[in-house]
Image (cartoon, rainbow, N blue to C red):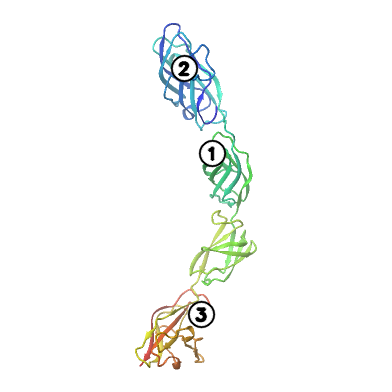
């Protein structure tokens, strides 16, 4: 008898006769005495009867239902069927039909009996004999008519990290609902039946290596092992990353990673969301930093075959970008209101915790300029030379610097300024603080 299955003929039949007259049987208690748990795994018991000189080997198609609604077995392995069956001097054959649930296991036995006819069979008149148990058809062996499953491959996150916990897809044949999956004997969790050819599950934790995968259906039929179908890879180990702080936001710095199991090649690391190529060896690799704004980010170092989803990576911190080396801002066009102004000095207000603030000035007789980069003039503090290669460099906030270079500015009604902020005093290395400017004042006289 298959597991699971419905509408099973239990085999054999009970027989009823009466020496004279007739009587109505209104209740029959059937007991299951085999090894299967009838309370949890047998259900929908129905009894059918027919007047026959010799009982049939299957339920006759014209047999009459004793109980039209199937009944279950209680904790005592007993099922009580109620109905009406007239018994006279001719033999009545009574047949049992029931369902087997998926919780039953292969090679369990099913044995149906009326344990004590004198008390388990209720008749309208007379006494039912014998008083000893009457079994029906001996033992029925439970098994499965379905084929055993097969596992042909494991996809999804395969390979994956030794920590497990990632999704895998098991491909094969003849899967049925509520199966189990093991990786080298260790149960996978969250096994989900998709269809007869596919399951999904969450892989267990395993040491690095390749392992056999087995799927088992609820009838306990197991697949042959899918040999070495599941592979685990240890994440890389990272011991040092240098440099790892105050990195240039413009990128382009060479970073050295020391450790083991480091992926070499395309997508070897990821800085925040940007992938980068590694070179070198699996114990000492280098990469070039991408452009990134200031702040702390995660450096993800991948192992061989590592991806974001299979977990074969190591997240390293701290990995910090500093402020930009420089930043510039060009003002709007200002109108002095006079045709022949004399420009005297420039002063700025704000805060200078580190770095430097520099200016250039451009002036024109018309609002349209020109205002090209070459028109913005600064002065070399040492030589006093004027030109677009130099900057005015006040020593700090609220300290004016004389413009000089009067031939470039005077008698020109309109002006603009360009300000450069440096996060370091040499304006060439990355700093950690930036000047803050709240006001810029250009002094001129009519």
- The answer to whether residue 203 is visible is no
In terms of depth relative to the viewer, which is nearer, 391 or 161?
Answer: 391
Judging by the rendered image, the residue that carries numbered circle 2 is 49
Tell me the CA gap for discs 1 and 2.
Answer: 38 Å
Asked if residue 258 lies left or right of residue 59, the reply is right
Q: Position of residue 211 (x, y in %)?
A: 62, 46
Query: Which labelled disc corresponds to residue 179?
Result: 1
Q: Quadrant of the C terminus?
A: bottom left
- Which numbered disc, 3 or 1, marks the residue that appears first in the sequence? 1
Give coordinates of residue 86: x percent, y percent: 42, 13
> Which is nearer the eye, 173 or 16?
173
Distance from label 3 to label 2 (Cα)? Answer: 103 Å
Residue 427: assigned label: 3
* 3 vs 2, front mark: 2
* x then y, percent, for residue 404: 44, 92
Mark closer to the observer (1, 2) = 2
Under tag 3, what secondary structure?
loop
């Amino acid at each position: 008898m298959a597991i699971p299955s419905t509408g099973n003929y239990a085999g054999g039949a009970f027989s009823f006769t009466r020496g004279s007259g007739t009587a109505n049987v209104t209740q029959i208690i059937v007991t299951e005495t085999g090894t299967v748990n009838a309370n949890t795994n047998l259900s929908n018991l129905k009894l059918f009867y027919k007047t026959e000189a010799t009982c049939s080997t299957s339920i006759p198609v014209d047999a009459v239902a004793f109980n039209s609604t199937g009944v279950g077995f209680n904790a005592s392995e007993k099922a009580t069927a109620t109905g009406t069956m007239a018994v006279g001097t001719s033999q009545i054959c009574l047949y049992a039909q029931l369902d087997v649930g998926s919780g039953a296991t292969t090679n369990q036995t099913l044995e149906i009996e009326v344990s004590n006819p004198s008390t388990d069979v209720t008749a309208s008149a007379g006494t039912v004999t014998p008083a000893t148990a009457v079994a029906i058809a001996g033992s029925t062996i439970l098994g499965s008519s379905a084929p055993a499953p097969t596992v042909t491959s494991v996809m999804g996150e395969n390979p994956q990290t030794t920590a497990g916990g990632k999704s895998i897809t098991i491909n094969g044949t003849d899967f049925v609902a509520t199966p189990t999956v093991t990786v080298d004997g260790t149960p996978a969790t969250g096994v989900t039946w998709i269809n007869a050819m596919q399951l999904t599950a969450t892989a267990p934790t395993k040491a690095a290596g390749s392992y056999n995968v087995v799927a088992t259906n609820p009838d306990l039929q197991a697949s042959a092992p899918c040999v070495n179908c599941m592979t685990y890879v240890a994440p890389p180990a990272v011991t040092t990353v240098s440099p790892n702080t105050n990195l240039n936001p413009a990128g382009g710095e060479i970073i050295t990673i020391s450790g083991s199991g480091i992926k070499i090649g395309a997508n070897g690391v990821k800085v925040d969301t940007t992938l980068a190529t590694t070179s070198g060896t699996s114990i000492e690799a280098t990469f070039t930093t991408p452009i990134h704004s200031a702040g702390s980010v995660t450096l993800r170092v991948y192992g061989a075959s590592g991806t974001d989803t299979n977990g074969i990576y190591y997240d390293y911190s701290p990995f910090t970008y500093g402020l930009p080396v420089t930043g510039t801002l060009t003002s709007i066009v200002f109108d002095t209101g006079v045709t022949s102004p004399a420009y005297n000095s420039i002063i700025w207000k704000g805060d200078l915790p580190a770095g430097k603030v520099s200016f250039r000035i451009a002036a024109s007789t018309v609002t349209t300029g020109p205002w090209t980069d070459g028109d913005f003039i600064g002065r070399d503090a040492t030589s006093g030379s004027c030109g677009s290669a130099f900057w005015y460099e006040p020593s700090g906030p609220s300290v004016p610097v004389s413009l000089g270079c009067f031939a470039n500015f005077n008698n020109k009604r309109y002006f603009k300024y360009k300000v450069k902020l440096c996060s370091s005093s040499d304006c060439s290395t990355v700093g950690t603080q930036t000047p803050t400017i709240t006001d810029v004042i250009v002094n001129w006289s009519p």
